[in-house]
């Protein structure tokens, strides 16, 4: 009986104290979220960017980011779609 009273008292005190409960990590604001760079592949002579498994990459396969490929004028491959990310 005394154990139960002590346990109940401890629980009540821990609930009453603001620092007694665990603090959850703050969620990052949408503006500070890191963006993951999408990896795509281009060829030495082509004008399109591809996913790693695309059969259009038989002869050459150069790794780059989607943003860089688009900046350089590459467009998505018609067969594989270019990438899975937005």
Image (tube, rainbow, N blue to C red):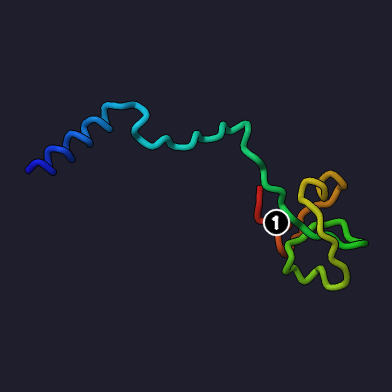
> Which percent across, then down, holds residue 71?
84, 44
Question: Is 5 or 51 nearer to us in this picture?
Answer: 5
How many callouts does the rendering have? 1
Report the residue that reaches farthest toward the left: 1
- Judging depth in this view, the residue of 39 and 19 nearest the camera is 19
Quadrant location of the N terminus in the rendered image: top left
User: Is 25 on the left or on the right of 41, as rendered?
Assistant: left
Label 1 sits on a secondary structure element that is: loop
Q: Nearer the viewer, residue 74 or 31?
A: 31
Q: Position of residue 59 (x, y in %)?
A: 88, 72
Q: Nearer the viewer, residue 30 or 47?
A: 30
Q: Which residue is mark 1?
A: 83
Residue drawn at (82%, 47%) of the image: 68
**Residue occupying image coordinates x 73% and y 57%:** 82
Q: Which residue is drawn at the image coordinates 67% and 47% (left, top)?
A: 36
The quadrant holding residue 52 is: bottom right
Give the farthest residue toward the right. Answer: 45
Q: Is residue 40 above or below residue 35?
A: below
Side of 85 relative to 6 (left or right):
right
Q: Residue 10's spot in the image, x, y percent?
A: 22, 35
For this orientation, the residue located farthest to the front is 2
Q: Position of residue 74 (x, y in %)?
A: 84, 51
Instruction: Classify residue 13 as left or right of residue 27.
Output: left
């Amino acid at each position: 009986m005394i154990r139960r009273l002590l346990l109940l008292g401890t629980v009540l005190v821990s609930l009453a104290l603001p620092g007694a409960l665990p603090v959850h990590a703050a969620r990052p604001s949408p503006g500070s979220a890191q963006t993951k760079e999408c990896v795509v592949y281009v060829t030495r002579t082509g004008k399109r960017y591809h996913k790693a498994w695309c059969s259009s990459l038989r002869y050459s396969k150069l790794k780059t980011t989607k943003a860089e490929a688009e900046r350089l004028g590459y467009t998505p491959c018609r067969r594989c779609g270019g990438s899975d990310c937005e």
